Each structure stands twice: as structure tokens, then as C-alpha cells.
């Protein structure tokens, strides 16, 4: 991200196991109620999202659950931004969304029809409804966006990558970008497809419960010169970095650390300017890689670290996008949401984890981390406007 026009976040649309809409999600994040997580090694957290209540009826048979979530989240984010898209040229609107698993529930639904009823009962929409790009393309059609419709597929890191790509569109002359990430893989096929990703996440933090959820977040991005409305933006996207871990990394080479340093340089901030880190994992503490990267970058400074995904679980590409929303809300309200800590989990040495209760403090910049299956590393710096 080069040209230094300020990119601001004017709207949020959140769907998570802990609440629909950013207000309910944020209330639950601050309350940090672990009742749904107690006493189980494996927990599946579905959201209360009912597509028929939020999506036009003609789209229901054409779309998978993850696409329906994307459409609802985008609608909510636009409403939250108080943005009239009719005031924006169609060529200036883009849709950029990340997705890790596709519409697996739609595949299962139609395959059951094929096996039990025959091929004449399979919907023709199957040819594209399962595909990763359906989310961006359906949002583009719904909002008459003639600008780019991009799809990012980089596992759990995808939500950050999508936001960065949306910023590139705006810095090339775009007016509005609808972006974020969503995933829903709680159906049998989805769980099988996601098993490798989830095993990777479990291996990073073996002491944590295996918690999976569904949902994500949509964000409306604009340049500050294109935002004459009285509504207050949540914050700004300041910098981004990414890297990829090789199969056989060199000793001492941390891809995550490289991504963080790149993001800080892109944001033109020093490590001392970061006031909170949103960890990439969904466990109650950092794994060895994140601990090493945070310790090295911040040179031993005890920067506060939190992981709100301990309440929502691994959510594929939706998790990173939800963390961006949480970081922006944290800056907006000047409070850090806590990390849920199961009984018996100790505070990791040398890391200032924010546990159990919110922490009110002055916040200017937040660093969001994400690591995707197979070696993807991404980091995003978001900042308060004042």
C-alpha cells in the first residue's frame, strides 16, 4: 500500500457465534462469558443467523450459507456507514472478500439430492454456489459494483489480505470498498474439508480446547476525502505486511516477524507506537511462533495482547476479519476486550495477556496478526483517527 491517502473504516457488519451485529458482538466480547466453552474439549459454536430474515427470498436457493452471511454482513456495514451507494459511481465500488472453504453446505445438500432423488433434482446453481468467489460476486451484483470483485483464498489469514487489497483499490482511485471475510464449515463436508486447517491450529496451541465457529465481518472502506457525512468512522487502515513460510525455513527466520515489520514500516509507525496486539490464534495464550515474533519485534516491551477468538473459535477467513472489527471497536471505545481463559490456564511468561476482564487504556494503534494454513502470515496496523 503506497500512496498515503488515509483509508478509513466507516461501517461494520458482524456475524459471529456471540452476536449478530457489531453492537451485540462487542457487548459479548467485553462480558467474556465462557459458559458455552466450559467442560468440553471440542466445541462447535453456530451463530443464530437465519438467512430468510435477512436475505431476499429469490437469493436463498442460489446461495450457500457463507454467501448469505456475506450479503447480510455487507448490507449491515453499508447501513452502519450511512452510505448512499447511489451517490457513488458504480465503477468506483469494489467487493473484496476472503473465504477459506467455499459453500460446503450447498455441495452436501445437492449431493444428497443426486444420490437419493436423481440428477434431475440437482439445482443448476451448484455450478457456482459452492465456489469461493461467489461471495464477492454476489455482493457485487447486489450492490451494482462495477469495480473489481476480488476473492482472497489464504486460509485464516485471508481476512487481513482482503482488507489490504481493498485499500489498494481505493488508492488507485476507487471510491468505496466493501471487504472482509466469512466462513461457515460446520456441516459434515465442511468439517472434513477444514480438518487439515483445524489440525494445524490445534498443533500450534495443543493445550487449548478445539473450538470452531462460523461467521466473520464486513467492512466499508473509504478515503477520508470521500467521507463528507456526519457519522464518525471507526478508525483507519494504516499498514499491511505479509510473508510466506517455506517448507524448510532457515534457522532464526520468522515469517510472522517479517510480516509484522513490513506492516509497521508500511504504516510508518515504530513498535513503541503499538498499544495492543490482537493475536492470530484462538487459544488462551500465544504459541511459540507468535511469542517469539512479539518478543523480538517489541524488544521485551510488555505490550498488551488479546485474543477475542477464544469466545468464537477458529472461523477460517472470517476470524481475521472479525479481529479487525474487534480492533477497530477497541480503538473506538478505548478499551481492550479480554481473552477467555479456561480454568487452570496460566499467564504465559513475558507476555501481557489481557485476561478475564476488559482493560480501559489509551489506544492509538492496534496490530492484528493472522496465520493461514500452509504458511501464510499477515499483519495489519489499524489506528484511531485522533
Image: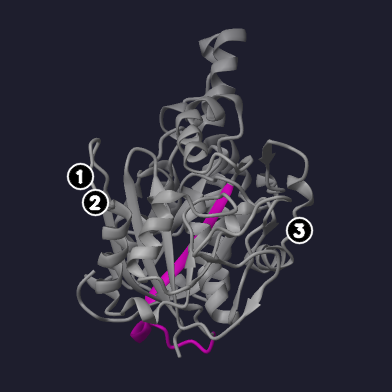
In what quadrant of the picture does the N terminus appear? bottom left
Q: CA distance from mark 3 to mark 2?
A: 38 Å
User: Can residue 189 be seen from the camera position used here?
Assistant: yes
The residue shown at (61%, 34%) is 186
Quadrant hosting residue 355: bottom right
Please name whichever residue, 297 or 126, is drawn nearer the observer in this view of the structure.
Answer: 297
Please name whichever residue, 190 or 78, is drawn nearer the observer in this view of the structure.
Answer: 190
Q: Residue 292 lies in magenta, yes or no?
A: no
Q: Which mark is residue 253?
A: 2
In what quadrant of the picture does the C terminus appear? bottom left
Q: Callout 2: few (<14), some (14-19), or many (20+) C-alpha neighbours within 10 Å?
A: few
| Image location (x, y in percent) of residue 206 | 55, 39
Q: CA distance from mark 2 to mark 1?
A: 5 Å
| Image location (x, y in percent) of residue 171 | 25, 72
Please name whichever residue, 54 or 267, is drawn nearer the observer in this view of the structure.
Answer: 267
| Image location (x, y in percent) of residue 42 | 67, 35
Q: Callout 3: few (<14), some (14-19), or many (20+) C-alpha neighbours within 10 Å?
A: some
The span picked out in magenta is: 215-231
| Image location (x, y in percent) of residue 347 | 60, 59
Left or right: residue 370 versus residue 120 is left
Judged from the image, the secondary structure of the residue bearing numbered disc 2 is loop
The residue under label 1 is: 250
The residue under label 3 is: 33
The residue shown at (39%, 64%) is 295
Amino acid at each position: 500500500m503506497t500512496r498515503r491517502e488515509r483509508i478509513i473504516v466507516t461501517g461494520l457488519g458482524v456475524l459471529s457465534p456471540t452476536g449478530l451485529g457489531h453492537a451485540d458482538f462487542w457487548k459479548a466480547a467485553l462480558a467474556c462469558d465462557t459458559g458455552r466453552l466450559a467442560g468440553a474439549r471440542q466445541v462447535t459454536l453456530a451463530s443464530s443467523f437465519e438467512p430468510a430474515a435477512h436475505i431476499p427470498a429469490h437469493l436463498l436457493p442460489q446461495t450457500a450459507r457463507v454467501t448469505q452471511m456475506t450479503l447480510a454482513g455487507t448490507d449491515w456495514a453499508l447501513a452502519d456507514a450511512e452510505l448512499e451507494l447511489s451517490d457513488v459511481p458504480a465503477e468506483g465500488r469494489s467487493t473484496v472478500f476472503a473465504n477459506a472453504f467455499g459453500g460446503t453446505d450447498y455441495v452436501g445438500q445437492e449431493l444428497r439430492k443426486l444420490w437419493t432423488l436423481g440428477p434431475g433434482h440437482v439445482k443448476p446453481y451448484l455450478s457456482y454456489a459452492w465456489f469461493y468467489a461467489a461471495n464477492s460476486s454476489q455482493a457485487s451484483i447486489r450492490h451494482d459494483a462495477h469495480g473489481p470483485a476480488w476473492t482472497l483464498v489464504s486460509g485464516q489469514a485471508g481476512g487481513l489480505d482482503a482488507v489490504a487489497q481493498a485499500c489498494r483499490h481505493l488508492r488507485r482511485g476507487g471510491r468505496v470498498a466493501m471487504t472482509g471475510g466469512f466462513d461457515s464449515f460446520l456441516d459434515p463436508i465442511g468439517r472434513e474439508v477444514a480438518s487439515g486447517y483445524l489440525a494445524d491450529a490445534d498443533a500450534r496451541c495443543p493445550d487449548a480446547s478445539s473450538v470452531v465457529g462460523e461467521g466473520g465481518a464486513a467492512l466499508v472502506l473509504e478515503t477520508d476525502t470521500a467521507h463528507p457525512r456526519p457519522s464518525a468512522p471507526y478508525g483507519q487502515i494504516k499498514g499491511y505486511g505479509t510473508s510466506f513460510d517455506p517448507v524448510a525455513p532457515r534457522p532464526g527466520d520468522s515469517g510472522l516477524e517479517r510480516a509484522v515489520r513490513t506492516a509497521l514500516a508500511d504504516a510508518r509507525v515504530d513498535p513503541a507506537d503499538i498499544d495492543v496486539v490482537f493475536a492470530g490464534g484462538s487459544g488462551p495464550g500465544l504459541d511459540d511462533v507468535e511469542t517469539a515474533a512479539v518478543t523480538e519485534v517489541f524488544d521485551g516491551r510488555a505490550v498488551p495482547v488479546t485474543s477475542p477468538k477464544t469466545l468464537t473459535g477458529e472461523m477460517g477467513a472470517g476470524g481475521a476479519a472479525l479481529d479487525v472489527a474487534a480492533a477497530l471497536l477497541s480503538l473506538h471505545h478505548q478499551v481492550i476486550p479480554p481473552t477467555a481463559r479456561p480454568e487452570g490456564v496460566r499467564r504465559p511468561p513475558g507476555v501481557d495477556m489481557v485476561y478475564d476482564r476488559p482493560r480501559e487504556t489509551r489506544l492509538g494503534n492496534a496490530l492484528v496478526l493472522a496465520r493461514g494454513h500452509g504458511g501464510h502470515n499477515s499483519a495489519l496496523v489499524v489506528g484511531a483517527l485522533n
